[in-house]
Amino acid sequence: MAKVERGPIIVIGNSRGAEVSTQRDTIARVLDCRNQTCPKPVFMVKSALAETGMGDMLEVIVNDDGAKQNVLRYCWNHGQEISKSYADGSDFHVFVRRSAEKKAENPLPSVGPCGTRWD
């Protein structure tokens, strides 16, 4: 599998608290969930994370607002690091670093670590 090189990524939060990293990350896998309606993108992310090595970065692309919210919520509530997210036209990209599966102690906040309201 080819790795895609990206610029420095700032880790701004996860379900266990804020962290900062300036290391150069590589994307282990790009998961294209565009034009998929929920719950399929969440199942695709869950499966891709299970196949991704611990600490590897997964880039998820969605273009449905409901899918975006549900993917972010799933990652947050299952202890995965949400490293970066941004909108690119109608597409939304979220970068998730695989962490040990751990249920979040706190429920999903109304404002996520990437500054997006999820309620």
Image: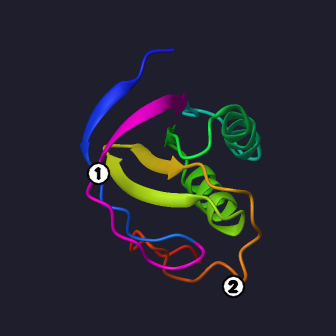
Q: How is the image coloured?
A: rainbow
The x and y percentages for residue 18 are 44, 77
Placement of 31 over or under 58, stated as above or below: above
The x and y percentages for residue 68 are 56, 54
User: What SS does tag 1 mark?
Assistant: loop
Residue positioned 62% across, 36% down in the render: 53
Placement of 77 over or under 51, stated as above or below: below
What kind of residue is marked 2?
Asn
Q: Is residue 54 magenta?
A: no
Q: Who is closer to the viewer here, 50 or 69?
A: 50
User: What SS does tag 2 mark?
Assistant: loop
The x and y percentages for residue 85 are 39, 55
Left or right: residue 75 versus residue 20 is right
Tag 2 or tag 1, which sits nearer the N-term? 1
Q: Residue furthest left?
A: 7
Residue positioned 74% across, 58% down in the render: 101
Residue at the spot of label 2: 106
Residue at the spot of label 1: 23
